[in-house]
Image (cartoon, grey):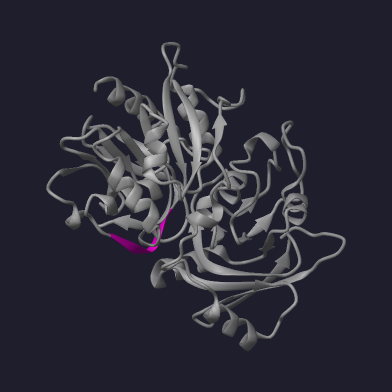
């Protein structure tokens, strides 16, 4: 555990009655929501700024966090979205020429409640055995009964339309490509560019960069934008982004996706994949503890390849509910859950994971090129 000149206590309570005691490394106050664990060894800044984590606190399973500090260009949105951060140990040294500040300073400045000194192996095992648990972290309330009561009263992501809370306020054009420090595993497209309208259900910046890199001129629209408005823009294709919360609560997005299928090519990832599945007649369900990490093997049935992927989702498409006009294309090899699908007739496909990485491996970056190729094949 790191030491500072002014140590502050922080307590974590779970709805099952368990209480962990540690030290505050972020902002003062309280935070609550669903607690999930992430198995990535790096990428804490990208994780914290991924809008998909709205409503959730994050436990990082890697034991030492903060080694490389915070770099401005690694932000995946304009602000942190995770409700809280829980780690085993915060490094006392930041070693990175790109760093602009330490993780602890960033957490305080960005008003993120966070704590260290927790047995994250025990906590992760508990979540694996009992499923995602509601939690509260406090730097001011140290009464166990009070904290457990707050954890039991915390708002879960079940039934919550969080996409409407994290989406952009109005449409905008995105034209930025990858930062120079980001590895480019696919060649930058040099030919004629295509027009893509991207629904922002909580889109990460690297998704938009990946689309631009792959030959798209991107216009981002709010989550609640009607399909008619998008079709009026005459896009070559429509992208449905990642995002937080329960896909079944995004009824407006499901209706929009229904209207888009058959009228324009569609590519969805993560929440966008789930919304598309609901629009096509499938069902979604909440997983026990979800997939959150950068090391998930996925088999692509269209190529036979196995790719290591970055994943962050608590809901999944029920493979048994896929309608007859949909084909399963990808499977998560850890638990054989559905990880991708495509339409038999229309230019529509989606995956459950994050091909844009940031953090994580770039094995699946080619899917953005596959989107372009699907459009050009029409």
* Location of the N terminus (image quadrant): bottom right
Name the residue furthest right. 5
Name the residue furthest left. 324
Task: Assign the magenta stretch its main secondary structure.
Answer: strand
Please report the bounds of the magenta region as a residue range.
284-291
Q: Nearer the viewer, residue 126 or 103?
A: 103
Q: Position of residue 76 (x, y in %)?
A: 58, 41
Question: Is residue 290 part of the magenta span, yes or no?
Answer: yes
Name the residue furthest bottom. 145
Q: Position of residue 18 (x, y in %)?
A: 55, 79
* Location of the C terminus (image quadrant): top left
Q: Position of residue 228 (x, y in %)?
A: 37, 41
Q: Is residue 332 above or below residue 266?
A: below
- Please indicate whether residue 108 sits to the left or right of residue 242 in the image: right
Does residue 185 appear in this view?
A: no
Q: Nearer the viewer, residue 243 or 218?
A: 218
Residue at 19% across / 52% down in the picture?
322
Does residue 77 appear in this view?
A: yes
Kindly indicate the quadrant of the structure image that contains residue 142: bottom right
Q: Nearer the viewer, residue 111 or 310?
A: 111
Q: Is residue 177 above or below residue 261?
A: above
Question: Is residue 356 part of the magenta span, yes or no?
Answer: no
Residue at 51% across / 79% down in the picture?
15
Q: Position of residue 81 (x, y in %)?
A: 60, 54
- Please indicate whether residue 225 sits to the left or right of residue 321 in the image: right
């Amino acid at each position: 555990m790191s030491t500072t000149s002014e140590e502050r206590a922080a307590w974590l309570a779970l709805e099952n009655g368990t209480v962990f005691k540690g030290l505050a490394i972020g902002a003062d106050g309280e935070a609550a929501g669903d607690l999930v664990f992430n198995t990535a060894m790096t990428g804490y800044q990208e994780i914290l700024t991924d809008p998909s984590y709205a409503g959730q606190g994050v436990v990082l399973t890697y034991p030492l966090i903060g080694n490389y500090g915070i770099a401005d260009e690694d932000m995946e949105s304009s602000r942190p979205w995770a409700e809280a951060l829980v780690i085993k140990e915060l490094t006392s040294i930041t070693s990175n020429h790109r760093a602009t500040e330490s993780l602890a300073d960033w957490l305080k400045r960005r008003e993120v409640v966070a704590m260290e000194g927790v047995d994250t192996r025990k906590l992760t095992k508990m979540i694996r055995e009992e499923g995602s648990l509601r939690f509260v972290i406090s730097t001011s309330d140290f009464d166990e009964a009070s904290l457990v009561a707050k954890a039991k009263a915390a708002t879960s992501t079940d039934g919550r339309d969080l996409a409407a809370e994290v989406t952009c306020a109005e449409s905008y054009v995105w034209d930025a490509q990858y930062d120079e420090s980001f590895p480019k595993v696919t060649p930058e497209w040099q030919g004629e560019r295509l027009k893509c309208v991207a629904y922002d259900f909580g889109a990460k910046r690297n998704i938009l960069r990946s689309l631009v890199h792959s030959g798209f001129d991107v216009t981002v629209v709010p989550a609640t934008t009607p399909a008619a408005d998008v079709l009026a823009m005459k896009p070559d294709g429509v992208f449905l982004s990642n995002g937080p919360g329960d896909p079944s609560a995004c009824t407006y997005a499901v209706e929009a996706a229904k209207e888009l299928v058959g009228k324009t090519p569609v590519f969805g990832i993560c929440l966008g994949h789930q919304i598309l599945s609901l629009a096509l007649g499938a069902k979604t369900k909440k997983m026990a503890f979800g997939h959150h990490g950068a090391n998930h093997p996925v088999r692509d049935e269209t190529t036979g390849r196995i790719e290591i992927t970055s994943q962050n989702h608590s809901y999944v498409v029920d493979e048994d509910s896929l309608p007859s006009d949909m084909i399963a294309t990808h499977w998560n090899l850890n638990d054989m859950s559905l990880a991708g699908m495509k339409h038999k007739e229309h230019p529509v496909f989606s995956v459950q994971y994050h091909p844009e990485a940031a953090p994580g491996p770039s094995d699946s970056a080619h899917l953005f090129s596959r989107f372009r190729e699907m459009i050009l094949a029409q």
